[in-house]
Image (tube, rainbow, N blue to C red):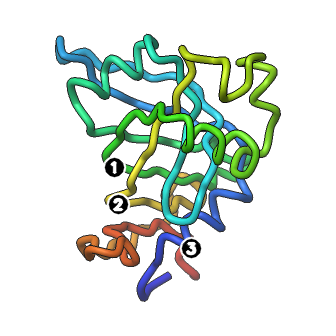
Amino acid sequence: MTGTTTLSDVRNFASGLSVWAHLATVGADGEPDVVPVHPCWEGEVLWVMVGTDSVKTRNVASNERVAMHWQVTENGDGVEIWGRATVVSDLETKRRLWKGVFDYDLDAFAPGGPDNSPTTAFMRIDVDRAVILRMYGAAGVDRKSTRLNSSHQIISYAIFCLKKK
C-alpha cells in the first residue's frame, strides 16, 4: 500500500479491530507502564476515561508522550499510535464526553455521572504518528513519513502491508 494515509484512515481501520487497546506511559522514574483501555475517537482526538490518581494520569503529568496498540485480529492486523496526552477534568468536557463520545456506559465505572464523580477525568491523546499493521507486518514493509501540520490532518505514519507475489 502506498500513498498518503490520513488519521481518518487510521481511525477507520482501528474501528474494525478490538475495542481494547494497550496504553503505554512512562513515569517520572523512567519506568514504563502498560494498561488495557477502551479508547474512543472524537474527530481526530482519542479519549480514555481515567481516574485522577491513576498511574497513567500521574505518568502523563510528568511525561506527555504515550503510545497505544490495539489488540490484533486473528490474521494479525493492528494499529499503533504515538502522541501527546493531557488529562482533562473540567465539568463541561466531562459532560460532553459522558453522553456523546463513548460507546459504553461510563456510569458503570463512575456511578455519580460527570457531575458527581470528582475522581474521574479523561485523557486526551493527540496523535502524532500511526502505524497500520497487516499480518503483523511480516509479509513486507512500506514506510512513509510526514509530520503533522497544525490542523493535525496529515500524520506521520508507516504502513505495513502484505506484498503481492
Residue 9 tag number: 3
Secondary structure state at the residue bearing disc 2 = strand
Q: Alpha-carbon distance for marks 3 and 1?
A: 17 Å
Q: Name the disc covering residue 24, or none.
A: none
Circle 2 crowding by C-alpha within 10 Å: few under 14, some 14–19, many from 20:
many
Which of 38 and 71 lies nearest the eye of the viewer? 38
For residue 30, above or below residue 42: above
Considering the numbered disc 1 on the image, is that residue within a helix, a strand or a loop?
A: strand
Q: Give coordinates of residue 132: x percent, y percent.
A: 51, 62
- Give coordinates of residue 131: x percent, y percent: 44, 60
Label disc, if present, on residue 83 of the rendered structure: 1
Tell me if residue 154 comes above or below residue 14 in the rendering.
below
- Viewer-nearest residue: 62 or 111: 111
Image mark for residue 129: 2
Where is residue 113 shown, x and y percent of the image?
73, 25
Q: Residue 45's spot in the image, x, y percent? A: 49, 56
Q: Amino acid at mark 1?
A: Gly
In contact (CB < 8 Å): disc 2 and disc 1: yes
- N-terminal label among 3 and 1: 3
Classify 138 as above or below 154: above
Marks 2 and 1, how far apart at CA: 7 Å
